[in-house]
Image: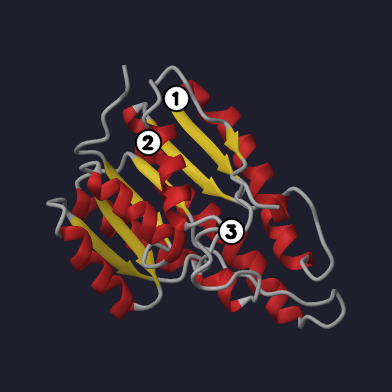
Amino acid sequence: MMSSLKNKKAIITGGSRGLGKATAFAFAKAGVDVAITGRKESVLKATVSELETFGVKAIYAVFDVGNYEEVKSNIKTIIDSLGGVDILVNNAGIGSFGSFMDMPVEQWTQIIQTNLMGMYYVTKEVLPHLIAKNEGDIINVSSTAGLTGNATTSAYSASKFAVIGMSEALMKEVRKNNIRVVTLTPSTIESDMSIEAGIATKGSEDSVLQPDDFAELIVAGLNLPRRAMLKSAALWSTNP
């Protein structure tokens, strides 16, 4: 029997647009109360208004996942407001591309700080709540760039390779607590980040993965019986 997501409570980082927003909508349609995070309040506020039309509780918090003090205070506020947490989707991330020598040290460091340390910070604050209830789900978004490095992706690939290592290690650590940790490695998805980077074009539904495809995979994994866990999944377009 499939598990029900109705009345579950989820936190989605980077939830105001792209992959995070699509996941938030999929959750709301399934009856999940949702908290989304990001750094642009106007966009978060607009997304929450849309989510509320599904009859679920929807809230937002504005903070930088790469700032641990901001993460600590805001995650506590979110969990208090939601009345708990069952699902964490670590989606927030940034991507910049350039040759190894040309990319500024500060930019390289920021990618690692956001994509890796940000995921660590948020998970560190949410995990004790899942352990206390002996149940929960953590979905960590990596990338195919975390499986194979390419020219001009040194910083982004380094961050996403690290995410896979951290995620898989955590999965083995908390299985005993009935917590499922999933590592996702999607290929190019039509999102704001991929469009801005020039690796996807807007309106390419027939050839490039869409955020809704990504959200559908997450919901399917969560709906598995608790005895089953989607350890990892690589989502690819059918078009080469």
Give amino acid for label 1: Asn
Q: Residue at x 59, y 45 (%)?
A: 235
Report whether residue 85 is seen. yes
Foreground: disc 2 or disc 3: 3
Give neighbour class at mark 3: few <14, some 14-19, many 20+ (Cα, 10 Å). some
Name the spot of residue 110 as percent of width and height, x first.
Answer: 64, 73
- Distance Cα–Cα, label 2 vs label 3: 38 Å
Name the spot of residue 70 as percent of width and height, x first.
Answer: 41, 68
Left/right placement of residue 67 relative to residue 38 reads right
Q: Does 207 sit above or below residue 153?
A: above
Give amino acid for label 2: Leu
Q: Which part of the image, by quadrant, shows the N terminus?
A: top left
Give neighbour class at mark 1: few <14, some 14-19, many 20+ (Cα, 10 Å). some
Q: Does 22 sit above or below residue 32?
A: below
Give neighbour class at mark 2: few <14, some 14-19, many 20+ (Cα, 10 Å). many
- Distance Cα–Cα, label 3 vs label 1: 40 Å
Question: Residue 130 has which mark?
Answer: 2
Query: Do tag 1 and tag 2 residues touch (Cβ < 8 Å)?
Result: yes
Chain-order first, disc 1 or disc 2 = 2
Residue highlighted by disc 1: 177
Name the secondary structure under disc 2: helix
Chain-order first, disc 2 or disc 3 = 2
Q: Does 42 sit above or below residue 117?
A: below
Left/right placement of residue 85 relative to residue 106 reads left
Residue highlighted by disc 3: 207
Chain-order first, disc 3 or disc 1 = 1
Q: Residue at x 66, y 65 (%)?
A: 112
